[in-house]
Structure formats: structure tokens, C-alpha cells
Amino acid sequence: MKKIFSTVLLIAGALMFAGCAGEEESLFDKSAAERLNETGKIYSTRLQSSEAGWVMEYYPTNTEETYKGRGYLIMADFDKDESVTLAMNNIMTDYEYMEEKSLWEIIADNGPVLTFNTYNEVLHCFSNPEYYESGKGFEGDYEFVMIDVPEDGQFIMLKGKKRGTYVRLTRLPAGTDFEEYLNDVNAFFNKYFPENVVNEDVLVVGGEKYAINNGNAGIMGMYPYDGDAITETTEHPFLITKRDGKYYLRFRSNIKANDVEEQEFVFDEAGDRFVGVTNSENLISGPDPSVFFRQYMQQGYFWMFTPTSEMTGNIATLLQTVVSDFASKKYNVQNIKFSMDGEDARVTVTVRSGSSNVSLVYLYNATVSDEGISITYREPYVSGNNKRAEQILTTIPTLADFLKGLNGSYKAEKANETGFNLSAMKLTLQDGSTIAVQSSVR
């Protein structure tokens, strides 16, 4: 009896196993390799679906090193004949447009992987060990795990197979010309993040305020607005792209403060600022012009204008009279400078006689605040036996009128098209007079 019961159990178990095996075959009737190949074909079709191609935000590594860490825009057009056209215009090409064609495919490697499998100078220069640092190069990837490839998606997300750096592809509208696109984006970048800009910009995320600098290098330095630039600066690579007629600034990684994160900002032309895509209270902008005008002087720099600078009102009239009176004495007025001397302000009038320049310095009482600076004429600056600044007031009495005409509170505004570049400013006095000034560092 026991033997018969055991035999029945064995037969029942076999039947159950056979039933389960049949169910597994219906669920997994294709091998993993077949499923990967099918997915690869689907992803290939989606890459090819953009008529004008894609713009790739490429980062060689996840470091903050100047060249290995910064981002590079690469244009990519995937054709059905398994060829791809890549293009770029950046420091790697000496800012000349470069375009090259090669091959690509999607391979199965623990998931679909996009590989650029024949040499293309545009992309493979970042993985060539002979470039930049001998034996290492830029350490960039040319094979990418396909992370997110939605059907008809605006974006495709990739991840470098070796370095793990995320790369985003953005679909381009039909008719996009690669060279024109890159020229457009580069011009925007250089306009809002110019080389040798005198001012720092301002970032606000999660209600926290940061000073930002070095944008022209493609890696922003950030530190708390009232903090220490040397010990508290962190570095954040970013790129500028364009879609739907708007410019976007996207960091390689999220910027986080007070549990608020933001990675991408869209440029608001009317507001002359970048606004957070996910939270409009997160902003990137230039500094307040009047605050910067005052701070710049207090840091030992000066603002300068000349007789040919743009100016209006009483100041313009007084200066032209002074210029004429100096000319009658064989002197040419070269420039006038605003600067600080401790708690006092200085106005330096530089005139030229023959082949020599003479600097005449005059001291002002100064009151500074976040609204700007107010100055009141006090006296000529006399140093030792050098009394020329005092003596010239007798020779050119209209100079005293001009110096007193500079008295007042100065409101500073941007003179360039954008407040991201305050190397030029327009000063306005209470009487409505205006003066266009240039910074001492350009």
C-alpha cells in the first residue's frame, strides 16, 4: 500500500512539473539573446527617427578637471545604412567646425549598447590615449549603455560603459543645420559667459544664494554668497543647448540646497536670467549693478571714462568745457577714473602734454551702501612737493566746476546688452546726468 501511494505521488509531481514547464515556455519562448537583438533593432529605429539628428551633451569623465570634466556638444545623425555623421565646434577643434562620418551599431552586452565602432575623430579623440595626457588621454567613452530610449521621445539617455558618465541626446527639429546650430549656441555662450568677465554671477537654489564664476571655462565655480571663495568653492560642469527657440543651461549633475534640486535652467530673455525648469524660484543671474559698482571699487579696481564716452546732461557740458580749456593750454584730457582710497573716493584726471601723461588726483568723501555710492568733493591730493593737482585748479578754474559736478549718488545700470557682463556700466546722477564707464579689467 505504501508503495502504491508513493508511486501515485511521483506521477502527480511529474504531471505538475510538466504543466509548469509548459507555462514557462509560453512566457519565455525567446532566448535572452533574441530579446536583446529585438530591443536593439527597436532602439536603432528610434535613433534613426530624428530626421535632423540629435545634439549630444558629452562629458568624458565625472571629474572636475578642466578638460576631462567639462562638457562638449556633439551633433549626431544616425542613418539607416549604419553610418553616423558627427560634428562639433569647440576647444578640441580650435573652435573650427569639424564633421566626420563613420559607422555605428547597437550590440548586446548585458543590455543594449550603442557603439561607435569605426574611428571618428569627433568622438574618438576623447578616448585616444595620445591626446591631452599621454597614455590616458581624456579617458572618454565611445560605447554607451542605453538607459532610456522612449518612442518618439525628445530625449534619449545614455551612460558611458567605462566611465559611467551620463550623456543626453536631444532631438533636433527638421531642417537643423549642424554648423549653424553650433555657431548659434557658441555665440550665446560667449555672450553670457564671456572670457575675463569682471563680475561674478549669482545662483539661487532652495533659497540659498551662491556666487558663481569661471563660467567661460565650462565649469562653474560656486561658493556661498557671503562665504570664502578659496575654501568653499565647488565646481560644476555645464552645457548650453537650444530647443524650441529657447536656450537651456544644464549642469552635469543636480545642484542641491535645502533638499531642493535643480539641474536645468531655461533662459528668460525679458528677465535677463536663467530660470529653473522644475522650480521657477531657482535662478541664475548677473549681480545687482549698483552693488557690484561699489564692491569693485572697494576691491581696488577703478571705473574709467573718456571725453568721447557716452554721457548726457550737466556732466557732459562741464566736461566739454574742461577739455576745451585744457586744450588751450596744450593739454589733452585722456581719461577720468573713479576709485577708492580706504574710506574715501578718488577721481583721477589724466592729461597728456607732449609725450608725457600727468595724473591729477582729487579726494572725495564717500558713503557706500548696497544702493551704490555717494561722493562729495573735498580737496586736491597733494603728495610731498607734487602740488600739480592743486595748482592746475588756478590755471583751469573750470576743472573745479567739473569736480563738484561729479558730486552725488550714483545709480549703476548695465551698459552691455546683458547683466551677465558688467565690464561696462551706465552711471546716473540725481540731476539725470549719465556717464558710460568701463572697468579697469577688460
Image (cartoon, grey):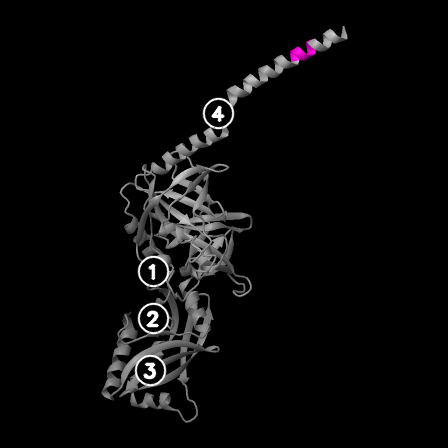
Which residue in the protein does label 1 denote? Answer: 94
Determine the CA span between mark 4 and mark 2. Answer: 74 Å
* Viewer-nearest residue: 434 or 146: 146
Looking at marks 2 and 1 on the same chain, the residue that comes earlier in the sequence is marked by: 1
Q: In the shown orientation, is residue 398 left or right of residue 345?
A: left
Per the rendering, the mark at residue 350 is 3
Residue 92's place in the image compared with 178, above or below, is below
Dot 3, crowdedness within 10 Å: few (<14), some or many (≥20)?
A: some
Per the rendering, the mark at residue 437 is 2
Determine the CA span between mark 3 and mark 1. Answer: 40 Å
Of the residues shown, which amino acid type is indicated by label 3?
A: Thr
Which residue in the protein does label 4 denote? Answer: 30
Determine the CA span between mark 2 and mark 1. Answer: 33 Å
Quadrant where the N terminus is found in the figure = top right
Dot 4, crowdedness within 10 Å: few (<14), some or many (≥20)?
A: few
Residues at marks 2 and 1 touching, judged by CB atoms closer than 8 Å: no
